[in-house]
Amino acid sequence: MHDATRTIKTAYLARVEGEGGMLVRVKGDEIEEVKLNIFEPPRFFEAFLRGRYFTEAPDITARICGICPIAYQSASTQAMEEIVGVEVGGQLRALRRMIYCGEWIESHSLHVYMLHAPDFLGYPSVIEIAKDHPEVVEQALRMKKIGNEVMQVIGGREVHPINVKVGGFYKTPTKAELETLVPELEWGLQASLDTVRWAATLDFPDFEQDYEFVAMVEDGLYPIDRGDRIISSKGLDIPISAFYDHVAEEHVEHANALQGRLKERGAYMVGPLARYALWHNLLCDKAKAVAEEIGLPKVVNNPFKSIIVRSIELVEVFNELLRLIGEYEQPAEPSLDCPPRAGTGHGVSEAPRGTIYHRYMTDNAGLITDAKIVPPTAQNQPQIEDDLKQFVGKFMDLDHEELTLRCEQAIRNYDPCISCATHFLTLEIERT
Amino acid sequence: MSDILVVGTGNSWRGDDSVGLEAANALRARLPEEVRVLATEAEQSSLLDEWEGCDTVLIVDAVHSDAAAGTIHRVDLNAETVPHAVLQGSTHHFSLGDTIELARALKRLPAKALFLGIEGESFNPGEPLSPAVAAAVPAIVEEIAREVEALLQESS
């Protein structure tokens, strides 16, 4: 049917040559090659962390990503607290969870409305949606701002929250300070329920995969801020210290990032679909009820429907923040004493886009001798490539433009963190 | 005067991408206290909230085109659109260009909005500013300071 070689190539991720891009090469009906090139900076940070004092890790790693600093801070503080033998519990732990919920709100509302929705609504970007439906975009910005305010009340008014430290916080908020957030959080809870109902009305390609879903276990709670085990839908159940016994990081030539694969079975998926499939039973009643109302099954294998699941997770975190603020009592001390110690520590949290793993080794003086950071996108990358391969195979008859757009959308399903790196402008200047 | 905002943006770990932050930090020491100066590495759409209620915003960032390193580009955002290449979609990132155009669409761009871009040449992780870019910082600080002083005089 098709004889010619078709190449689908996008450099749209590229603000710098080689920063990111996608290549799918098809010959006849055969897919010859799928390459996703994603640059991620953690390798650089791993080297940079060596020789630094252990308490510096949260501040340094928070700078890896402008949109998920808390994910990095949470995993690094957990690892360091394991090394020094301190357990952060009670209201300090609740505050850690609250600030992380703020990050989810910011990230998920940005992705659902501003990055993913245009694909479904047939707009080139949210800017065109804003021209036709400004009220929708204003709602999204209001939701996102609530997340930002949560992070500022708990984390301080800096971009990268400076208040989180090994052992707790530099300063804790009063209950009254947190309660100022309640009216907007209540609005946000309603807005997120509406978001779920709206997302359910979108058109989704008929595409499902048999995923191995991977997420962490968080002690009876929907997994967000701190895990002690990692499980999968195909039988993986390991303490986080055994991460590298089961996950191999492979360097592939076309990508600067290492790709994570399960040694036993290969590609796997982390992120909203994985958390939802594994921990649906731990969602709050409102989130469960709205999922049932729209007829969403307990396991979603269509990655395009991640926009619905992200919206359900928005319901979860708005509700969780209201619960935690209601129960909050300001702790007597903002942090626990953490004297340096030699050892190895592990940390796992659920970034908005999936499980993040950190491992550190320190010497007697508390200096970091080794650092490993495995971000979610490195783990999802083989699965994204497999999705692209299967998707193109199934929808090869779509015209070139439509297929290219759908491939981009298939990548966006994962909300990949490709630009923790730079945000300078690519500027084209025409001179006549 | 709380209605003038100066924003320097970028990534402090990526070579010349930090030039906007450097310029903002220098401007904080240089400008009168009543002018708000923000050096930010945050996700860019949050800038919409930062300049809410401002009459004037001056934005400094690194740019990457075919000009010589250290070249200063000046764009009056109310008169010109941000070049199209800036608006390419991405999977995760909402860029400064996107933010400016979104603000325009939502009528949330301040009455005076000026973009000053400094041409960078090296954006490798962990590197300092390249010499040509570092040398341009005093010039851009001076240009913005003059701009702000003129605005303050106009309004006094």
Image (cartoon, coloured by chain):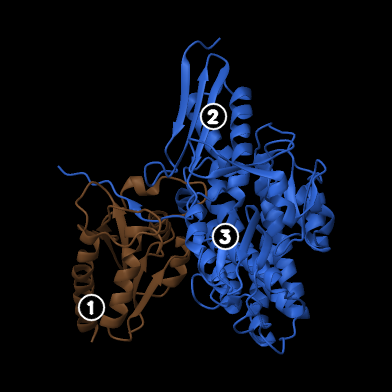
Disc on the earlier residue, 2 or 3? 2
> x, y percentage for residue B27?
28, 77
Q: Which residue is mark 1?
A: B151
> x, y percentage for residue A294?
77, 48
Hue used for the chain lettered A: blue
Residue at 80 percent of width and 53 percent of height: A279
Q: Residues within 10 Å of mark 3 (few under 14, many from 20)?
A: some
Identity of the amino acid at label 3?
Asp
Looking at the figure, which quarter contains the C terminus of chain A? top left
Helix, strand or loop status at disc 1: helix
Q: Which residue is mark 2?
A: A34
Q: What is the number of the mark on residue B24?
A: none
Nearest the eye: B8 or B77? B8
> x, y percentage for residue B9?
37, 65
Hue used for the chain lettered B: brown
User: Looking at the picture, does residue B43 appear above or below residue A170?
Assistant: above
Label 2 and label 3: CA atoms lie apart by 33 Å
Label 3 and label 1: CA atoms lie apart by 52 Å
Residue at 19 percent of width and 78 percent of height: B150
Chain of the residue under the numbered disc 2 shown in the image: A
Residue found at the far front of this picture: A364
Q: Classify residue A352 by image quadrant.
A: bottom right
Identity of the amino acid at label 2?
Val
Nearest the eye: A196 or A216? A216
Helix, strand or loop status at disc 3: strand
Identity of the amino acid at label 1?
Leu
Looking at the figure, which quarter contains the N terminus of chain A? top right
Residue A93 visible from this viewpoint: yes
Nearest the eye: A93 or B126? B126
Label 1 and label 2: CA atoms lie apart by 54 Å
Q: Residues within 10 Å of mark 2 (few under 14, many from 20)?
A: many
Q: Which residue is mark 3?
A: A370
